Image: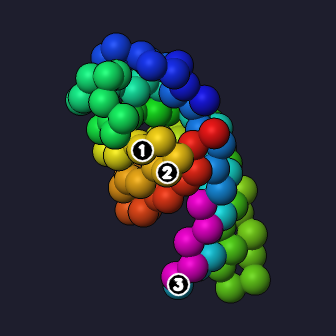
Amino acid sequence: MYKDNAENLSYDAMLALNVVDGSSNVIVPLSLIGIRYYLTSNENQTRIFANALAGFAMEVKQERGDTETKPDLGYSAGIFVEGKNLLLGVSIENPEVIVLKLGVVF
């Protein structure tokens, strides 16, 4: 969710579910809000922007048959390229993972 055709700054929001499989399985649902800063003009069909989001996360960690659930601070920061129909970017999010994102703009 964001403001279409923003000049430089806009609001941004994200709902996500990060699943990390390692020595322990971690599932983190995120509900985040923040800002989006456009690095290119709104006259361009392809826009580059960075965002910084923060909000609520619930970390569910499963290790050796035990499940631990705790509320946490959720965050995401990244840089993206948005075309007419596609969005491509990379961000860092809870729980300290780098995420490659590909999306559809509608």
Q: Secondary structure at mark 2?
A: strand
Q: Is residue 19 above or below residue 47?
A: below
Mark drawn on residue 23: 3
| Contact flag, marks 2 and 3 (Cβ < 8 Å) | no
- Residue 80 appears left or right of 67: left
Q: Is residue 9 magenta?
A: no
Q: Which mark is residue 71?
A: none
Amino acid type indicated by mark 1: Gly
- Residue 35: image location, x then y, percent: 42, 24
Q: Amino acid at mark 2?
A: Leu
Label 3, residues with CA under 10 Å away: few <14, some 14-19, many ≥20: few
From the top left corner, tell me how far across and down residue 6 is, in percent: 42, 16
| Amino acid type at image mark 3 | Ser
Residue 83's disc is: 1
Q: Report the side of 7 relative to 76 (left or right).
A: left
Q: Using the rendered image of the protein, determine whether residue 49 is visible from the camera's viewpoint.
A: no
Provide the residue designation for mark 2: 86
Where disc 1 sits, the SS reads loop
Assess disc 2: are there few (<14), some (14-19) or many (≥20) residues with their C-alpha within 10 Å of its C-alpha. few
Out of 71 and 46, give the one closest to the viewer. Answer: 46
Observer-side mark, 3 or 1, equals 1
